[in-house]
């Protein structure tokens, strides 16, 4: 009788351990799936962002050729003023 109880207890403990392992694996897969979806969304969102245009200064002779005047920039004590 003691041997049967020991076998039943061992089988029950193995079933609980197996169920715990399956649950942990499914939670791990769910976390991996959610992370993959979020990374894919971030990748697609970054892909559709417009590419930044870098500002470059034009040469004085190029501005003179197009008829544009030199921009005036000064600081009045409250902030920088740029007069284009």
Image (cartoon, grey):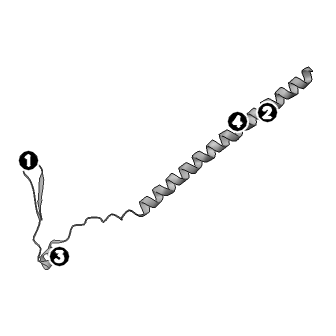
Q: Secondary structure at mark 2?
A: helix
Nearer to me, 16 or 36: 16
- How crowded pointer 1 is (Cα within 10 Å; few <14, some 14-19, many 20+) is rated as few
Q: CA distance from mark 4 to mark 2?
A: 10 Å
For image coordinates 91% across by 23% down, the residue present is 3
Residue 30, position in %: x, y?
Answer: 60, 46
Relative placement, left or right, of 33 versus 6 is left
Q: CA distance from mark 1 to mark 3?
A: 32 Å
Label 1, on which residue? 77
Label 1 vs 3, first from the N-terminus: 3
Relative placement, left or right, of 77 versus 1 is left
- Which quadrant of the rendered structure holds the C terminus? bottom left
Q: Secondary structure at mark 4?
A: helix
Front disc: 4 or 3: 4
Q: Work out whether 18 lies above or below 62.
A: above
Label 1 vs 2, first from the N-terminus: 2
On residue 14, the disc is: 2
| Contact flag, marks 4 and 2 (Cβ < 8 Å) | no
């Amino acid at each position: 009788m003691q041997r049967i109880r020991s076998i039943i207890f061992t089988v029950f403990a193995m079933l609980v351990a197996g169920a715990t392992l399956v649950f942990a694996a499914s939670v791990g897969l769910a976390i991996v799936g959610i992370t993959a979806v979020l990374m894919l969304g971030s990748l697609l969102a970054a892909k559709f962002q417009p590419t930044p245009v870098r500002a470059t200064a034009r040469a004085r002779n190029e501005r003179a050729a197009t008829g544009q005047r030199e921009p005036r920039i000064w600081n009045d004590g409250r902030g920088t003023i740029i007069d284009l």
